[in-house]
Image (spheres, grey):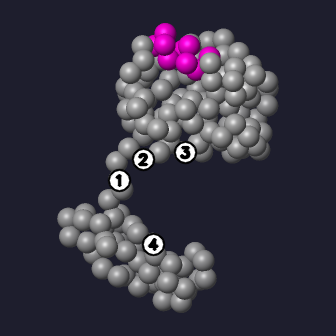
Amino acid sequence: MFTDTELTNYVKEISLSKFGKAFRHHAQWNSRLRTTGGRFFPLDDHLDFNPKFASHPDFDKIILHELCHYHLYNAKAGYKHGDRDFKILLKQVGGSRHAPALTPREINYLYVCDRCGAAYPRQRKIDIRKYRCGKCRGTLRCEGRSKWGVPFD
């Protein structure tokens, strides 16, 4: 894993190569981040990164995501997740929209559409009288409950 100085230099390299703009602030590790890969702080323009993602193959995409926030904020453009400018720039540079999962998701219930056969794995039980298939509006049926979080085959 990098030190904070090495991380800042790495972020500067990626910023110049992908955006053609300099990253003039600092990047640091923040072990308090749980599910997010990184965070941009508009008040002082620094970036925090989750050290759990340091060895992840998509770590560069997480850096690109945070640099999109950084450069758009400094350009006084839409830098938030829902803004059009952010979505366009993120797609151009190839950053990830969401942080990748660190652990596989536990699947306790599997619901299947009667009409089109679409599968909906879920952690929690849902009321099948209330919900329908998102693709064809067909009725759902519970295929079963896995024992102790063991994935369905």
Mark 2 element type: loop
The quadrant where residue 151 appears:
bottom left
Query: What mark, if any, has residue 104 been given in the picture?
Result: 1
Q: Which residues are magenta?
A: 4-12
Locate residue 122 relative to residue 28 in the image: left or right. Answer: left
Query: In the rendered image, is residue 78 in sight?
Result: yes
Where does the image place residue 70, in percent across and percent down from the top left? Answer: 67, 25
Is residue 78 within the magenta segment? Answer: no
Locate residue 59 relative to residue 52 in the image: left or right. Answer: right
Mark 1 element type: loop
Q: Which residue is mark 3?
A: 98
Question: Which numbered disc, 1 or 3, marks the residue that appears first in the sequence?
Answer: 3
Q: CA distance from mark 4 to mark 1?
A: 16 Å
Report the amino acid beneath label 1. Answer: Pro
Q: Nearer the viewer, mark 2 or mark 4?
A: 2
Q: CA distance from mark 3 to mark 2?
A: 9 Å
Q: Which residue is mark 4?
A: 120
Question: Which numbered disc, 2 or 4, marks the residue that appears first in the sequence?
Answer: 2
- Residue drawn where x is 73% and y is 40% of the image: 92
Query: In the rendered image, is residue 73 in sight?
Result: no
Q: CA distance from mark 1 to mark 2?
A: 7 Å
Q: Residue furthest left?
A: 148
Locate residue 43 relative to residue 77 in the image: left or right. Answer: left
Report the amino acid beneath label 3. Answer: His
Magenta highlight: main SS: helix
Q: Which residue is mark 2?
A: 101
Report the amino acid beneath label 2. Answer: Ala
- Residue drawn where x is 73% and y is 26% of the image: 19
Report the amino acid beneath label 4. Answer: Tyr
Mark 4 element type: strand
Q: Residues within 10 Å of mark 1 (few under 14, many from 20)?
A: few
Q: Residues within 10 Å of mark 4 (few under 14, many from 20)?
A: some
